[in-house]
Image: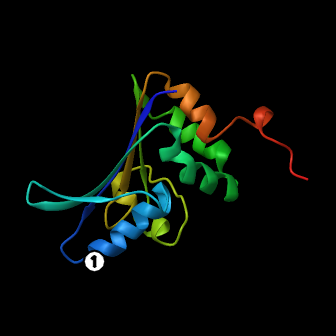
């Protein structure tokens, strides 16, 4: 399945870019390469990945936190054509938790935006947060 994944966060003037990068990496995965860019006079951190591998860390966080059903609801409601775009709370990501931000204001320092571009958004959602009937029973 083809998918282009993008994690993006602006760095506020009062923030340490390395700490913001750590929050992004907690969602994207430790092996991700975060690029620092200057956009409109602001520092932005960006990770771009290809395929479902770019979402593997997020998938495991949703499973570990047992929030796959809620994640399916948020992700499904965020589909626009061939894209899924959601925001995550930066402070929660900093401590290794995935917490959706319904609006950018829910994350006081600004959210971490995750955008997935794919020819089959619903299949990607099914992979990231499988429906109950497709989950493996726990031993």
Q: In the image, residue 123 lies at what x, y percent? A: 58, 27
Residue 1, x across and y down, in percent:
52, 27
Q: Residues within 10 Å of mark 1 (few under 14, many from 20)?
A: few
Quarter of the image for residue 91 reads bottom left
Q: To which quarter of the image does residue 136 belong?
A: top right
Question: Where 97 sits versus 72, above or below?
Answer: below
Q: Residue at x 51, y 72 (%)?
A: 95
Identify residue for label 1: 16
19 sits to left or right of 29: left
> Which residue sits at x=44%, y=54%?
101
Q: Position of residue 12 (x, y in %)?
A: 22, 69
Q: Residue at x 55, y 26 (%)?
A: 122
Q: Is residue 100 above or below residue 4?
A: below
**Nearer to me, 100 or 40:** 40
- The answer to whether 62 is drawn above or below residue 136 in the figure is below
Does residue 61 appear left or right of residue 113 in this picture? Answer: right
Query: Along the line of sight, which residue is nearer the eye, 119 or 97?
Result: 119
In the image, residue 12 above or below residue 139: below
In the picture, measured across the screen, residue 111 lies left or right of residue 16, that is: right
**Residue sticking out furthest to the left:** 41
């Amino acid at each position: 399945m083809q998918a282009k994944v993008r994690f993006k966060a602006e760095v506020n003037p009062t923030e340490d870019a390395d700490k913001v990068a750590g929050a992004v990496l907690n969602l994207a995965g430790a092996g991700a390469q975060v690029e620092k860019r200057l956009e409109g006079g602001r520092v932005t951190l960006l990770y771009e990945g290809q395929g479902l591998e770019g979402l593997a860390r997020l998938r495991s966080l949703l499973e570990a936190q047992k929030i796959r059903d809620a994640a399916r609801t948020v992700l499904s409601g965020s589909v626009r054509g061939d894209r899924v775009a959601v925001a995550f709370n930066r402070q929660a990501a900093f401590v290794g938790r995935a917490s959706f931000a319904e609006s950018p204001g829910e994350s006081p320092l600004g959210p971490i935006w995750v955008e997935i571009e794919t020819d089959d958004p619903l299949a990607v959602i099914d992979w990231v947060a499988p429906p109950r009937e497709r989950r493996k029973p726990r031993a």
